[in-house]
Image (cartoon, grey):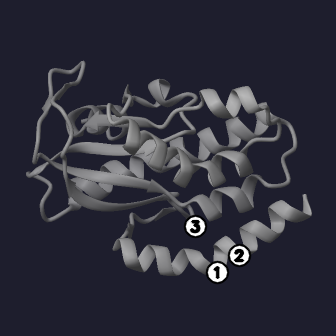
């Protein structure tokens, strides 16, 4: 446990620099709790992807890229020892942030251009229930790069580790169209 706290302390120090370098924006707060997403606009560079609501994501479409605020999440769940309870706590934080994400896009000056949201994660339990659709990256090099960069959050967020579980864990693209996001979280 000491090692986890030490890593989170170091990460807490480094995180503001990461936030600045990546040019991320916080999306707001609700009931005195900040959303756990940080975001930035991006142009999609992957292969075409047809979402179940009929939205086609194509090269150069404007998407809002979501980043979990990992340090904040880990600080809130570090004391939870049971893996199922920890997963539920993370899920609840994401779920509570989704309406704020929808509102952020609705109020954004480029809202008309934003086609949806995209993220990439190795923590992908429950994402379909949240409304996301999944796609695995095709590039083996990119997949390995993302696996390496996302391994710290994966290792710190789990309590039971096995080599096979780590080896089988793959980064996953998450997509949701703007209309699906608005319908599910704003009732529009």
The residue located at (52%, 33%) in the rendering is 170
Residue linked to disc 3: 32
Give whichever of discs 3 and 2 has the lower sequence position. 2
Residue 65 place in picture, x, y as percent: 32, 53
Q: CA distance from mark 1 to mark 3?
A: 23 Å
Q: Which mark is residue 13?
A: 1
Callout 1–callout 3 Cβ contact below 8 Å:
no
Specify whether 141 is left or right of 58.
right
Residue 126 place in picture, x, y as percent: 55, 28
Q: CA distance from mark 3 to mark 2?
A: 26 Å
Specify whether 185 is left or right of 158.
left
The residue located at (79%, 31%) in the rendering is 162
Residue 139 place in picture, x, y as percent: 33, 36
Q: Nearer the viewer, residue 160 or 130?
A: 160
Q: Secondary structure at mark 3?
A: loop
Callout 1–callout 2 Cβ contact below 8 Å:
yes
Q: In this picture, is 99 found above or below 124? A: below
**Label 3, residues with CA under 10 Å away: few <14, some 14-19, many ≥20:** few
Residue linked to disc 2: 10
């Amino acid at each position: 446990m000491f090692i986890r706290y030490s890593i989170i302390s170091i990460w807490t120090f480094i995180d503001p620099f990461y936030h600045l370098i990546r040019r991320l924006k916080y999306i707001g707060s609700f009931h005195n709790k900040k959303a756990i997403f940080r975001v930035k606009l991006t142009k999609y560079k992957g292969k075409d992807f047809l979402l179940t609501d009929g939205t086609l994501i194509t090269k150069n479409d404007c998407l809002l890229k979501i980043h979990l605020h990992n340090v904040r999440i880990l600080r809130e769940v570090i004391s939870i020892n049971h893996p199922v309870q920890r997963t539920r706590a993370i899920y609840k934080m994401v779920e509570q942030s989704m309406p704020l994400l929808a509102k952020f896009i609705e109020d954004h000056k480029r809202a008309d251009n934003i086609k949806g949201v995209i993220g990439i994660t190795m923590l992908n339990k429950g994402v379909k229930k949240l409304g996301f659709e999944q796609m695995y990256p095709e590039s083996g090099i990119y997949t390995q790069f993302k696996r390496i960069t996302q391994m710290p959050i994966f290792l710190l967020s789990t309590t039971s580790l096995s080599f096979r579980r780590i080896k089988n864990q793959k980064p996953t693209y998450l997509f949701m169209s703007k209309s699906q996001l608005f319908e599910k979280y704003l009732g529009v």
